[in-house]
Amino acid sequence: MTQDARSSFADPQFQANPHPVYAEWRRTDPVRWVRLPSGLDAWVVTRYEDARRALSDPRLSKSLPVGAPRSSALSADIGGAVSRHMLASDPPDHTRLRRLVSAAFTARRVEALRPRIEEIADGLLDAMSGRDRVDLIDAFAFPLPIQVICELLGIPAADQDSFRAWSTIIVTGSQSGDRLPGAMRAMVAYIRGLIADRRAHPGDDLLTGLIEVRDQQDRLSEDELSSMVFLLLIAGHETTVNLIGNGAFLLLSRRERWDRLRADPALLPGAIEEFLRYDGPVEAATFRVAAEDLEIGGQAIAAGQPVLVLLLSANHDDRFPDADEVLLDRAHNPHLGFGHGIHYCLGAPLARLEAQIAFGKLLGRFPELRLAVPAEDLAWRPGLLLRGLRSLPVVPGSPTA
Ligand code: HEM
């Protein structure tokens, strides 16, 4: 029997704190068939071991259609231009597509971006200084990763605002209602224009490199090229912002955490892993579909049925001691915040570096930073895919020199 979980998913209280509902699901019926906000019925996987196994099970395919109603609202032309990417592919396509860009995202290559990321962070924090109150999402958590991914790809800074609006609508999915197809069309038109422009005027950026792979070596179709840009833009737009936002919230809503990290900055890398576990930006992994009959955690799944792995729930499984506590010095933290298996986040080294720079600088420059409103008044974004605050009003306080 389908459990209609739509009322839970749409409830602001669930959005603010989904943990009790997930805890109940892990305890009572850990692999359950629910009705999602889109109206689609799917299996949700809530426990850690089941989640880990599901994410690395080749029988759970990324390339089969999930039957989500939203895909039908798009023409084949638009659909193809955004869906032929690695996160929607199985091997061997997945292997080929991922290999084309993986060199740009290794820990070593990413480390070379450090000075530029620091410069961007400094500029944003300079602009915050002297202000009585700012939205930390708008002023810092959002523009930092956007600017980085745009520079990496070679996208003009002036265009960033328009695709922020489209991208927010796209990742909110079915809960964006009628606005979704229009946002998709606008995004695809923008990406096609960008590709045409860079074909005419090559630069020294990732986009130019991908166009060469397409045009000179024929290792990429036109749809795969635009889908790759789409995926990198969305992934670079919508995730790290929430790592910075959610992490800042966890630190500022309990002052002793902020003070502890200020006193001992060596805790920072581990603290960031704990933010990823406790309130990671990606609440649910993307859909998978059973390519054949199989079992997850003792539950039979029929071929063709969609499966959604709830990363946030898995990360609060009691395989983590004191799972509902934020332990800045947690010793062993094999969280699933970046996923697992062949689709493990390509941008993880970049996201970690951005977060380290962001928190390092924030703690150093604004020691008195505090929330401008009670923590309970903050609103969380709707949608099951991502977990993040709509805004995070703060009082910066006096900056250090
Ligand atoms: C804190 C920030 C981030 C988090 C929490 C995150 C999380 C994830 C997760 C959970 C997946 C797997 C989804 C699934 O299996 O269904 C994933 C995949 C991916 N991420 Fe990230 N991500 C972050 C930042 C980034 C950044 C900055 C980029 C790069 C621009 C990026 C690029 C990708 C790509 C390309 C994939 C698909 C990999 C594949 O299919 O092989 N991510 N990410």
Image (tube, helix red, strand yellow):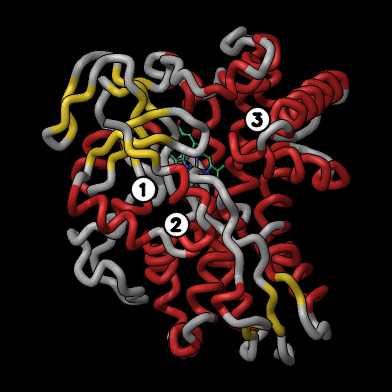
State left or right for residue 162 relative to residue 258.
Answer: right
Q: Is disc 2 surrounded by few (<14), some (14 to 19) or many (20+) residues within 10 Å?
A: many
Q: CA distance from mark 2 to mark 3?
A: 22 Å
Residue to which mark 1 is pinned: 311
Tags 2 and 1 in contact by the CB under 8 Å rule? yes
Q: In the rendering, at what x and y percent does residue 99 appear?
A: 47, 25
Q: Residue at x 79, y 28 (%)?
A: 186
**Label 2 vs label 1: CA separation?**
8 Å
Tell me: is circle 2 under 8 Å from ligand 1: yes
Residue under circle 3?
A: 230
Q: Residue 76: percent from the left, percent from the top?
A: 65, 9
Q: Is residue 258 left or right of residue 115?
A: left
Query: Going 37% across and 69% down the picture, which residue do you hit?
Result: 270
> In 3D space, how far apart are the residues under numbered discs 3 and 1 (Cα atoms)?
23 Å
Question: Which residue, given by chain and number where applicable, does mark 2 sit on?
Answer: 280
Q: Nearer the viewer, mark 2 or mark 3?
A: 2
Residue 124 versus residue 189 in the image, above or below: below
Q: Is residue 116 visible?
A: yes
Where, by quadrant of the figure, is residue 322 drawn?
A: bottom left
SS at mark 1 in the image: helix
Q: Is mark 1 within 8 Å of ligand 1?
A: yes
> In the image, what residue type sits under mark 3?
Phe
